[in-house]
Image (tube, rainbow, N blue to C red):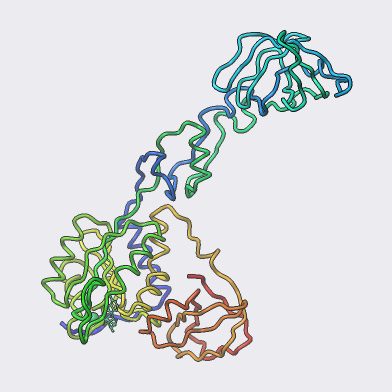
Amino acid sequence: MGTEFLKIIEVDEAKKIIENLFKENYEVKSENISIANSYNRVISKNIDSTIDLPPFDKALKDGYAIKAEDSFGATEENPKILKCIDSVKAGSFSNKTIKNGKCIEISTGSPIPKGSDAVMMVEFSEKLNESNDIAILKSVPPTEDIANKGSDIEKGKLILKKGTILNPVKIGLLSAQGINDLDVFKKPIISIISTGNELLNTNEKMDYGKIYDVNTNLIKGAILSSGGTPIIKGIVKDDYNQLKNRINESLKNSDILICSGGTSAGVGDVLKDFIEESGEILIHGIAFKPGKPTLIGKINGKIIIGLPGNPVSAIIVYNVFIDPYIRLISGLSEKEANKRKKFKLAKRIHSAKGRMEYLLAEIKNNEVYPIFKDSGAITSLSYADAYMKIPKSTEIIDAGEIVEIILL
Ligand code: AMP
Ligand code: MG
């Protein structure tokens, strides 16, 4: 125990190793779910329309189905009189055919009777007497207030592409098609363990020398936003056997395990020993600030990720190295490109040469304010809107320079 880092590798090399690890050890799966539970899920197959919408020629207004030509020349002063021969409510239909001089009372949403080519709005008509004479007060062209069968969507047309995230309106569209269940990407199940003798659950009483566990809930939220299903496996002491038991138990029902803490090479840092013994370590140490003590490995075909315990480091390592691949296997597109923005730097930055650095930053009035608090400062997380990448070879970036940031 308490050995040294295996080999510090460069950021790009680490990304390649992690990409392959996900490709080789996680099979992207689909599952069929009810439309009622589909909010925010990602569809895994193109969906074609199954029916014409509207399914029949439909009235768009309450009023009278007529032959348009019967209304030509009608005005309020000089109305045309039609005989009403039937009345139809939404959900039912009339068997009668409209001939010249006739009309059928109709409600919004009901099928247009045979022979009719226009709807006269009720506002431009008047019931004259008990003998069903209707005064038409306006001239309308053919097709007035009729939605033709299939005019919204034709049967067999692509309506949603694979990879679409289901929001309320898209779920509405599928409902209109009578689609009751659908195939979506299965969410990867990801267990979370926080390690450290100093950690307390948020429901425990504070004690001298202890701190509350931040990473469990921090990582849980991050996993949800990457499209995974997080499972909280709690806090484990810096103890080889405890960690071993908790990891083995967690791996039974998860695809991926994310631990935090105990990933360095000091006394009590036992995660590395355990992975080495039970599986294979692929990365221990990335030339990256903050986040050098990152451990990546696998055990029996399951992906094991060890994030640094420091919450700021943990979330940056997660965002840079883990989020893109969890998004990928969850069917979400790599959205990082959309999250990149360029702004003016408000304050000069000094960075250590020889190591890529990611700095949290606050964006105010379209300017980037780097957050210089020590990397253990939790409040730096609450101010941060973004992080910026400082290349290995850069030592100084002056205020006023345009820099690229990645929104959190
Ligand atoms: P470690 O990576 O275990 O060496 O921890 C680095 C720093 O992060 C130490 O100050 C730990 O107390 C702190 N730390 C580790 N795990 C957590 C956690 N889950 N929540 C908050 N702080 C943590
Ligand atoms: Mg620790």
Residue drawn at (82%, 19%), measured in percent from left and top? 71
Residue 203, given in percent of the width and then of the height, sits at 23, 71
Q: Which residue lies furthest to the front in this view?
A: 129
Residue 58, given in percent of the width and then of the height, sits at 63, 24
Residue 339, given in percent of the width and then of the height, sits at 53, 66
Q: In this view, does 182 lie above or below 360?
A: above
Ligand 2 is in which quadrant of the figure?
bottom left
Which of the two residues, 200 or 310, is positioned nearer the viewer here? Answer: 200
- The total of numbered circles placed on residues is 0
Q: In this view, does 179 lie above or below 112?
A: below
Residue 232, given in percent of the width and then of the height, sits at 25, 63
Lateral position of residue 407 relative to residue 149, left or right: left
Quadrant location of residue 81?
top right
Residue drawn at (44%, 50%), measured in percent from left and top? 40
Which of the two residues, 345 or 148, is positioned nearer the viewer here? Answer: 148
Which of the two residues, 221 or 144, is positioned nearer the viewer here? Answer: 144
**Quarter of the figure that contains the N terminus:** bottom left
Q: Is residue 169 above or below residue 382?
A: above
Lateral position of residue 106 relative to residue 249, left or right: right
Lateral position of residue 325 relative to residue 368, left or right: left
